[in-house]
Amino acid sequence: MAAALKAVEQGARVTLIERGTIGGTCVNVGCVPSKIMIRAAHIAHLRRESPFDGGIAATTPTIQRTALLAQQQARVDELRHAKYEGILEGNPAITVLHGSARFKDNRNLIVQLNDGGERVVAFDRCLIATGASPAVPPIPGLKDTPYWTSTEALVSETIPKRLAVIGSSVVALELAQAFARLGAKVTILARSTLFFREDPAIGEAVTAAFRMEGIEVREHTQASQVAYINGEGDGEFVLTTAHGELRADKLLVATGRAPNTRKLALDATGVTLTPQGAIVIDPGMRTSVEHIYAAGDCTDQPQFVYVAAAAALAPRST
């Protein structure tokens, strides 16, 4: 979106292709809903653990998850319209196509329209900003269960009594704490320690803080098998680890994200990918093909919205 608007400012005619909901991950299923949920959880935590001793008595909050979810979604809808839909509606220089695109060659795209039919879009320059999706680890039995990714967790209509979390990513940890503060008993399975790649010292501090809040952090623990047992009421997840079984009402899998490049037919363009499928770019966001650029989570750059927004402006002078 940032690149489209900047291109229009410089006189370009822009075609924006979106297969799902306008706005991408951040506003729809990422930053915005997660921070609203985290804020609600923080308020619940402050009420339960008042830092003012007898001056402001601690109370046990009543969590109305349905009402919280409605407020969260209303804000998401509002921001999506303000930052994306409303701007596009008022900008005739940007044509929006709703559908899935793949490359025919390095000068043309084939768009499978959501309403049916195909359309070929020729371009002088192309920016790929397809983002990433939750990666699912190859744990035996996992794909046969109704596990959550962050997308499902953020729109869950109830707070589970017991939540197991596979992964120690930023997404895993922020949602783990949010659910714990809203009333769930949370257990995190970390393959190593928290933030062992990014900053082990911060990881130690976060682990200590989590344990003080009653969040169980099982370090150096992996699930070797996942099963889901249907009962008379709700089902139960059973995770097998080297340290015994873990049972939970819900399972959140947040081990990282994979770039959305597999269905783009990039082999027809000559664009270079990493072994993980991320698009390789230079400091100017240019791929191995001079007139094709990429930005955001589909590239080999850090997966943060501010990085993506800044990167999308890099091609403006090339």
Image (tube, rainbow, N blue to C red):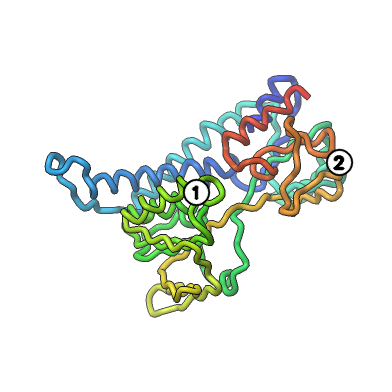
Q: Is residue 181 left or right of residue 24?
A: left
Placement of the N terminus among the 4 image quadrants = top right
Q: Is residue 268 left or right of residue 26?
A: right
Q: Is residue 61 left or right of residue 21?
A: left
Return the x and y of residue 24 as percentages of the image width and height: 59, 42
Return the x and y of residue 289 as percentages of the image width and height: 84, 38
**The label number, if any, that marks residue 106 in the structure image:** 2
| Residue at point 23%, 48% (across, down) | 49
- Compared with 40, 182 (above or below) is below
| Residue at point 70%, 24% (across, down) | 8
Q: Are marks 2 and 1 in contact (CB under 8 Å)?
A: no
| Of marks 2 and 1, the one in the foreground | 1
| Residue at point 52%, 40% (across, down) | 27
Query: Which residue matches tag 1?
Result: 200
Return the x and y of residue 101 as percentages of the image width and height: 75, 47
Looking at the rendered structure, the number of numbered marks drawn on it comes to 2
How many residues crowd around disc 1 within 10 Å: few (fewer than 14), some, or many (20 or more)? few
- Compared with 38, 230 (above or below) is below
For this orientation, the residue located farthest to the left is 54
- Compared with 18, 207 (above or below) is below
Of 187 and 265, the residue lying toward us: 187
| Residue at point 73%, 24% (across, down) | 316
Earlier sequence position, callout 2 versus callout 1: 2
Of 37 and 197, the residue lying toward us: 197
Could you tell me the amino acid type at mark 2? Answer: Asn
Return the x and y of residue 274 as percentages of the image width and height: 75, 49
Of 234 and 280, the residue lying toward us: 280
Could you tell me the amino acid type at mark 1? Answer: Pro
**The label number, if any, that marks residue 117 in the structure image:** none
How many residues crowd around disc 2 within 10 Å: few (fewer than 14), some, or many (20 or more)? many
Query: What's the CA distance linking mark 2 and mark 1?
Result: 43 Å
Of 103 and 274, the residue lying toward us: 274
